[in-house]
Structures are given as structure tokens and as C-alpha cells.
């Protein structure tokens, strides 16, 4: 297994990762009943070589994928080969961790301009007038 490169010089060593295999579901005939092609990659979040702030961000953003023991789990069964599934799961794990570590920019408060409010109200009046014209003629 390979190390995970999270960018900015952050690397998760391969010895922290644990891969398990199991039988994949779905169609595939006899092959699917014999071969363990599904791969699950597990990574304990507390063992990551990151500061506590980044670990907390990962825990918060990937909470649905982390179990009670604090282990992040990614599974792949897209391909028929174990090797391809392992590579896919590693890529997915790397992508999830990278996305979780990106700091969100604080939102700047903005206001709708007076002209934009005026345009919106005029458009509403036009639509209301159009609907009024659909009514009965007295």
C-alpha cells in the first residue's frame, strides 16, 4: 500500500492504513462467489500526523464515515479486481481527507442593491398584471 499525499507537505504513512477484503455483492456469476474483491481501507483519525485543529476538522466533516472507535472507513467494490478496488479506495480516502482539510473562507455579508430590489418588484407587478388580464371580462 502507498502513502496518502494530502498536499501542503502532509503525508499519511501507509503503515497507519489497514486494508481488509471481503466478497463483493451484485452480479458476476461464479467469480463473485469465490473472489474477495471488495476492499475496505481503515484509518484511525487520532493517529494522523496532524495538529489537533486539523484532526477536529476531519472528525467534523467526515463524521458520517467515522465509527465510535474513531476509525475512518472507505470501501470500494466498483471493479472486479481487488487491486483496482484497493487503488480506488485509496484515491477516495485521499480525496476525502484533502477536501476535509480545506479551510472555508468566511462569508462576507452583502446587501441587495436598491436597483435590484426595484427590478424584482417591477417584475412581480408585471406578472401580477398578466394574471389579472386572464380573468373574466365584466
Image (cartoon, rainbow, N blue to C red):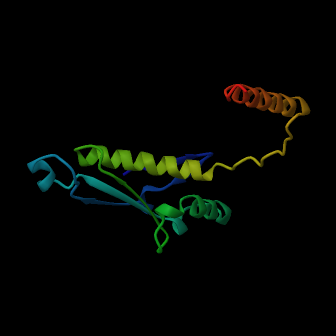
Q: Position of residue 36 (x, y in %)?
A: 20, 55
Residue at 34% x, 58% y: name it.
40
Above or below for 31 versus 16: above
Residue at 70% x, 25% y: name it.
137
| Quadrant in which the C terminus appears | top right
Residue at 68% x, 50% y: name it.
103
Q: Position of residue 68 (x, y in %)?
A: 47, 74
Q: Position of residue 1 (x, y in %)?
A: 36, 52
The reply to whether residue 108 is visible in this rendering is yes
Above or below for 133 versus 40: above
Q: Residue furthest right?
A: 114
Instruction: Name the image quarter holding residue 84.
Output: top left
Q: Nearest the camera: 8 or 29? A: 29
- Left or right of 33? Residue 79 is right
Q: Position of residue 7 (x, y in %)?
A: 58, 44
The reply to whether residue 4 is visible in this rendering is no
Q: Residue furthest bottom?
A: 69
Q: Residue furthest left?
A: 30
Residue at 26% x, 59% y: name it.
21
- Left or right of 133? Residue 66 is left
- Left or right of 78? Residue 35 is left
Q: Residue furthest front?
A: 138
Instruction: Name the image quarter holding residue 134.
Output: top right
Amino acid at each position: 500500500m502507498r502513502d496518502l499525499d494530502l498536499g501542503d507537505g502532509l503525508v499519511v504513512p501507509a503503515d497507519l492504513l489497514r486494508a481488509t477484503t471481503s466478497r463483493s455483492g451484485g452480479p458476476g456469476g461464479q467469480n463473485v462467489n469465490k473472489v474477495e474483491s471488495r476492499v475496505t481501507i481503515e484509518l484511525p483519525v487520532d493517529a494522523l500526523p496532524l495538529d489537533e485543529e486539523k484532526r477536529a476538522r476531519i472528525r467534523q466533516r467526515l463524521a458520517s464515515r467515522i465509527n465510535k472507535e474513531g476509525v475512518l472507513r472507505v470501501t470500494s467494490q466498483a471493479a472486479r479486481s481487488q487491486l483496482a478496488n484497493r487503488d480506488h479506495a485509496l484515491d477516495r480516502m485521499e480525496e476525502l481527507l484533502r477536501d476535509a482539510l480545506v479551510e472555508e473562507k468566511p462569508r462576507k455579508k452583502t446587501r441587495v442593491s436598491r436597483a435590484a430590489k426595484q427590478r424584482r418588484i417591477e417584475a412581480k407587478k408585471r406578472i401580477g398584471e398578466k394574471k389579472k388580464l386572464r380573468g373574466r371580462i365584466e
